[in-house]
Image: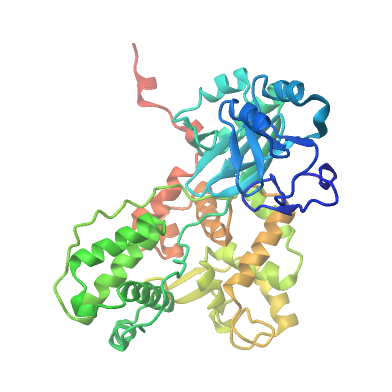
């Protein structure tokens, strides 16, 4: 940020959300003021035809309409030339050691001589660094390296090893290193910008209930369908053609920039009305559905998991996270647990009507049972195993907040969520030699292919596998 000392008392300084440049009133100043960032130079000066002509002569110079100042690139001899040209007319010259880098429409501060690496939700590493010949040479050794001319950033696929490699490059070339993980934007709800004049048809809602769709699907489909019918406020549902449906989906993708999962959910919500409610035949819309991005789930290793649980001091909070991890639960399954679902004799936890309307049993760990007994004795839950202050069902947002707090206290840099505990449970079982079929049953997966993803995460035991070629006698 710019220090206020650069400006006189008569000038108004505000903060622009999109830039670190100063916002000034149109009131002229007597002297020239220059603010230098690692990549840009801001020039605040009175209106003068000769001065403006000189600045216009600098390549890539531009007038900043919002901040009422000129901006020129900070490279080559631009700064020295400006100093020589304005000379004693320069009343202040402030050099800022940090600049704001825009990545995925978010701003990050990067200091001079610092390598900034940002892990984006689509599992790529965006890299911003001052031009350094040796650093650039080493970056070009990474596979699938891309350069964005607009944002002046490099990008490579995310890999935990690549983060370590970037840190080593920074240290070797005497650069500071900063690593940031952006939160995942998967399954973000569609932000409503369409005026709502039509309600969701009652027969649509009744059919969802009749077919016993989950509460989550009920809300998602209802929201998506209301958005759809209000996009065409002057047409009845009977008048909305296949072409209009396709145009609406294209609008969501192009203008609203929805995720792949939201796009597929919206298509399913629309198809539900025409196929299930109206009883029509299955319809194929001539619109390519994008493939879901295949990424490996994030997992914590045993030491990280142990440290995270150890740093969860509150008894109720620890009981919640230990139960989720030790039983491989989804967050929704955890809040739906009742006291009666804990079977201490058989050392099992009963999960009722989980995803796919299925019941199952999973593990009740000895250490988890000990914590749960302490918790029940102190908090005395009545119906739900984990209750709020008024005896209501515990909320998912509260559990997410608990996890984030413990994660921050532990210093875990991975883009982990509560669901990471479930992935870690499965991975740790696999690494300890548990058969994949048992893991599938404990997690409640319908298909073994879903469970097989954990075989791509663990590499334990690879050093003990011998390639067949090593048995050849050449």
Q: Position of residue 267 (x, y in %)?
A: 29, 65
Which residue is located at x 67 percent, y 88 percent? 390
Residue 420: x %, y % from top left:
55, 56
Q: Nearer the viewer, residue 271 or 404?
A: 271
User: Which residue is the extreme one toward the left?
Assistant: 281
Of residue 100 and residue 294, the one placed in the foreground of this image is 100
Say left or right for 468 vs 13. Answer: left
Percent coordinates x, y for residue 155 in the rendering: 51, 35
Image position of 157 (left or right of 235): right
Q: Is residue 167 in view? A: no
**What x and y, as percent, mark residue 226?**
36, 77
Q: Is residue 230 left or right of residue 131?
A: left
Q: Is residue 453 above or below residue 252?
A: above
Q: Quadrant of residue 358 in the image?
A: bottom left
Q: Residue at x 47, y 63 (%)?
A: 188
- The quarter in which the C terminus is drawn is top left
Q: Residue furthest top?
A: 474
Number of numbered discs visible in the structure rendering: 0
């Amino acid at each position: 940020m710019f220090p206020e000392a650069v400006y006189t008392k008569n000038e108004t300084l505000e903060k622009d959300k999109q830039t670190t440049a100063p916002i000034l009133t149109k009131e002229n100043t007597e002297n020239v003021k220059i603010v230098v960032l690692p990549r840009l130079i801001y020039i605040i000066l009175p209106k003068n035809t000769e001065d403006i002509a000189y600045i216009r002569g600098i390549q890539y110079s531009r007038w900043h309409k919002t901040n009422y100042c000129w901006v020129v690139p900070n490279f080559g001899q631009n700064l020295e030339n400006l100093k020589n040209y304005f000379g004693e007319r320069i009343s202040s010259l402030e050099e800022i050691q940090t600049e704001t880098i825009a990545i995925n429409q978010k701003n990050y501060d990067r200091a001079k001589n610092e390598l900034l690496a940002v892990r984006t939700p689509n599992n790529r590493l965006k890299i911003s660094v001052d031009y350094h010949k040796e650093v650039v040479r080493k970056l070009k050794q990474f596979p699938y390296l891309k350069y964005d001319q607009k944002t002046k950033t490099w990008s490579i696929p995310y890999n935990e090893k690549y983060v370590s490699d970037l840190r080593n490059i920074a240290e070797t070339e005497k650069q500071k290193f900063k690593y940031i993980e952006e939160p995942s934007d998967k399954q973000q709800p569609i932000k409503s910008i369409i005026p709502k004049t039509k309600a969701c048809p009652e027969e649509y809602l009744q059919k969802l209930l009749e077919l016993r769709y989950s509460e989550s699907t009920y809300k998602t489909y209802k929201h998506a369908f209301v958005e759809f019918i209000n996009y065409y406020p002057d047409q009845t549902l009977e008048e909305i053609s296949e072409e209009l449906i396709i145009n609406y989906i294209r609008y969501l993708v192009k203008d609203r920039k929805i995720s792949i999962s939201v796009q597929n959910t919206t298509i399913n919500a629309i198809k539900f009305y025409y196929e299930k409610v109206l009883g029509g035949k299955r319809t194929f819309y001539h619109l390519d559905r994008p493939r879901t991005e295949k990424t490996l789930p994030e997992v914590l290793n045993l030491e990280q998991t142990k440290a995270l649980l150890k740093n969860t001091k509150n008894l109720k909070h620890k009981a919640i996270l230990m139960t989720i991890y030790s039983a491989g639960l989804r967050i929704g399954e955890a809040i739906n647990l009742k006291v009666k679902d804990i079977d201490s004799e058989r050392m099992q936890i009963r999960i009722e009507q989980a995803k796919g309307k299925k019941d199952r049993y999973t593990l009740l760990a000895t250490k988890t049972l000990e914590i749960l007994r302490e918790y029940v004795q102190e908090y005395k839950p009545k119906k739900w195993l984990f209750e709020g202050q008024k005896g209501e069902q515990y909320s998912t947002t509260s559990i997410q907040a608990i996890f984030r707090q413990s994660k921050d206290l532990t210093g875990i840099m991975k883009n982990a969520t509560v669901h990471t505990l479930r992935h870690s449970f499965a991975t740790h079982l696999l690494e300890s030699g548990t058969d994949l079929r048992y893991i599938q049953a404990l997690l409640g997966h319908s298909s073994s292919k879903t469970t097989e993803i954990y075989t791509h995460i663990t590499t334990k035991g690879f050093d003990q596998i011998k390639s067949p070629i090593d048995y050849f006698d050449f």
